[in-house]
Image (tube, rainbow, N blue to C red):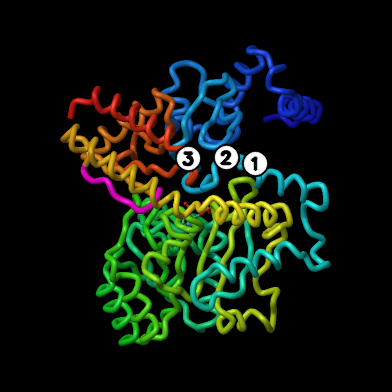
Amino acid sequence: MPRDMQLAHKETSRILDLVKRPAAEISREDRERVARDTVDNFANHINKGFLQYRKSVTESGGFAVTEWVGQGSILRDALDREYLDMLGGFGLYSYGIRHPRIVEAVKAQLDRSPQYSQEMLDPLRAQLAKVLALMTPGDIQYGFFANSGTEAVEGALKLAKLYTGKSGFVSMLKGFHGKTLGSLSVMGKSVFRQPLLPLLDGVRFVPFGDADAVEQVLAAAEAVGDGIAAVIAEPIQGEAGAVVPPDDFWPRLREICDRRKVLLIADEVQTGFGRTGAVFGLDHWNVAPDIICFGKALGGGVVPLSSFMATPEIWKVLEPNPFMHTTTTGGNPLACASALAAIEVLFDEDLPGQAKTKGEYMLGKLGELAGRYPGIFQEIRGKGLLIGMEFVDNEIGYKVAAGLFARNVLTAGTLTNAQCVRIEPALNTPREILDEVLNRLEDVLRHIKP
Ligand SMILES: Cc1ncc(COP(=O)(O)O)c(C=O)c1O
């Protein structure tokens, strides 16, 4: 694109004018232009590829659905079409979109200081670390803050290597930990990993839920003298489709890691903060990891925030040179205010309890639907409000996801990847919205011929 400063200036002001203008004063013509420009801008400046995957483009039947206003579990596009959000940003919106108390705290902090100087000590970051230390299982006490889930995992891997002096990892097939190079090394999916090989050396994979396989791989590594720093896993696999391991998996992992002197890293980026019906995923099995990773909901769905935390014993390795791992913007005051307000909401609204009862309700109702409409679902599984609907094949899965989208319900599921569609709404989604989604789902199922 030819360089043009004047046009860049004009284009900046044009969109900012829309952002600042009250919704009622934005004309239909302007709104249509937003929808059209967004598609063009995606095609020309983000990635054309996305346009073939987003139902907001492929299934919109006219103007693309562009995200414009959100509140709670409801999203409206630029043309004021309303959608029920059952995707929750893949676990980002556990508190709903723009929870008023989280927004209030962030606005108040914005009026003081949005980022930090890098020299003065910042009170919110330190207090958030203390609060998280009080909430996390076992002896977890120190934390480092970043912005994305993958950064939390990167930090956890570095910390495990530094502390143990070993370089190998054991990870889980179909596990998902993010897409930067370190996290990608422990990702259990070939499609994202293989084109970038070689990645970190010495990573082994075992089936998720198979503690015997972990034991065997660790024993084999020991026998040939390969050092393994840590075993890393999600408490419940999210991206793989809400896969819940057998009840003895995590307690056995803890015992195996202790016995073999290998660290245990829990990636709670998706399962943390109430999502699965307990504060943390590992709380279902009363297991304390050595290192824990947070992201997504940690920032309250208002400002991105992630973290990795560990015990004082492990953290000691970072003390001689605290600059071994740093980032300029991680744990900034806005993000910490957002996280602290979110944690207060988590307690005050008993979000883990809501996720538990609403999750059980949804699993029950989805099971009834599967019984009434045979030949469509393979399995319905999950814990809390991390639910996976596995369909008999990808085609049927896409028909359901597209049918829901046509009835203004947002879920994941693309043309090529819809065999398992997650339901991951805000934990405080009102029961009436859940019932409405179930009604619309039944309407979709009625029209599908298996
Ligand atoms: C368990 C888990 N870890 C890490 C990540 C990566 O987080 P981010 O996309 O914020 O980098 C994800 C994202 O889906 C995740 O589900």
Spot occupied by residue 404 in the image (x, y as percentages of width and height)? 37, 28
- SS category of the residue bearing label 1: helix
Q: Residue at x 51, y 32 (%)?
A: 48
Disc 2 residue type?
Ile
Membership of 105 in magenta stretch: no
- SS category of the residue bearing label 2: loop
**Label 2 environment density (alpha carbons within 10 Å; few <14, some 14–19, many ≥20):** many
Which residue, given by chain and number where applicable, does mark 1 sit on?
100
Q: Is residue 142 above or below residue 197?
A: below
Q: Which residues are magenta?
A: 378-385
Q: Residue at x 33, y 44 (%)?
A: 361
Which residue, given by chain and number where applicable, does mark 3 sit on?
429
Comes first in the chain, label 1 or label 3: 1
**Label 1 environment density (alpha carbons within 10 Å; few <14, some 14–19, many ≥20):** some
Disc 1 residue type?
Pro
Magenta part, dominant SS? strand
Which residue, given by chain and number where applicable, does mark 2 sit on?
97
Q: Nearer the viewer, mark 1 or mark 2?
A: 1
**Label 3 environment density (alpha carbons within 10 Å; few <14, some 14–19, many ≥20):** many
Side (left or right) of 172 relative to 32: left
Q: Are marks 1 and 3 in contact (CB under 8 Å)?
A: no
Q: Is residue 306 above or below residue 428?
A: below
> Looking at the rendering, in which quadrant would you find the N terminus?
top right
Side (left or right) of 361 relative to 301: left
Which quarter of the figure has residue 127?
A: bottom right
